[in-house]
Amino acid sequence: MNTKKVMKVASSLLLALLISSTAHAQYQVGDAVSDFTLQNHDGGTITLFDYSGDVLLLTFWWFACPPCQQEAPVIQTELWEKYKDRNFQVLSIGFREELDAANLWVDLYLITHLVLIDEGSVFESYSGSSAFSAFPLNAIVGADGRLLYSEIAFDLETLDGIIESNTIVVSVDDEPANIPDKLRLHPAYPNPFNPSTTISFDLDVRSSLRLKIFDMLGREVITLFQGTLDRGNHSFKWNGRNKDGKQVSSGVYFSQLQAGDLLRIRKVTFIK
């Protein structure tokens, strides 16, 4: 074989290798998914297994993706707000985005669920690709840690049906009224807890507020939410980690809700 033919064959093999390198192992429905650790938009970190026992909607986005921009507010209002009192969590994952973009995403679409950033490996595990063309990608992981659904599409009816049929209510209001008549911070549920607990509260008016966790010495552990919310019932989860993403020690902590001059505090216990 002459030199030109050798070079041609070598080039063909290199091209084939480069093409094949863009393909990645992809989870199939029914597969047990692996844990991952991603940075939260507030600078902390979370792991997938922090939410063991919950049904998880993983919705992947990048900032310049029009379909992602269209589905973000729908996921917030039609799925998260609808099912947040169940064993359900939304992980909105920015593909190769920075913290500034994640925070802007939160502000633009008034998102109150988790917004994370991924350098690409998590996205590739669910899409089988590293291409920006694989959007919008939505996947649902069941409470048993197995993949229930994954499609490069946004089918609200299908997503809603899977979430409704695979989740249960985990928080109970103190009073039956659906419309709050005062600021109320409910007991965390479950309590004691491990790995996560849900902290729910009622707002009687649209309010700017802060929901924080403090330790027994009065030191701030983490801010779960800071911003403005409409009147109604709201819930946030605490995964037993501090603002640096490290797991806290076993013991008693306090959830603190402050709206204007009003302050509400509840005791919550983390166990290992």
Image (cartoon, helix red, strand yellow):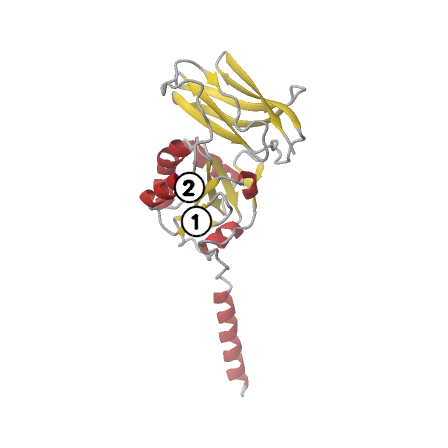
Give the answer, above or below, for where 32 lies relative to 176: below
Q: Residue at x 51, y 31 (%)?
A: 237
> Of the residues shown, which amino acid type is indicated by label 1?
Leu
Q: Residue at x 56, y 42 (%)?
A: 49
Q: Are marks 2 and 1 in contact (CB under 8 Å)?
A: yes
x and y percent of residue 12 in the render? Answer: 49, 75
- Name the element at disc 1: strand
Left-right relation of 191 to 250: left
Point out which mark residue 166 bears: 2
Residue under pointer 1? 148
Left-right relation of 70 to 197: left
The answer to whether any part of residue 75 appears in the image is: yes
Looking at the rendered image, the quarter that the N terminus falls into is bottom right
Left-right relation of 186 to 219: left
x and y percent of residue 268 in the render? Answer: 59, 24
Give the answer, above or below, for where 15 lies relative to 190: below
Q: Residue at x 64, y 35 (%)?
A: 247
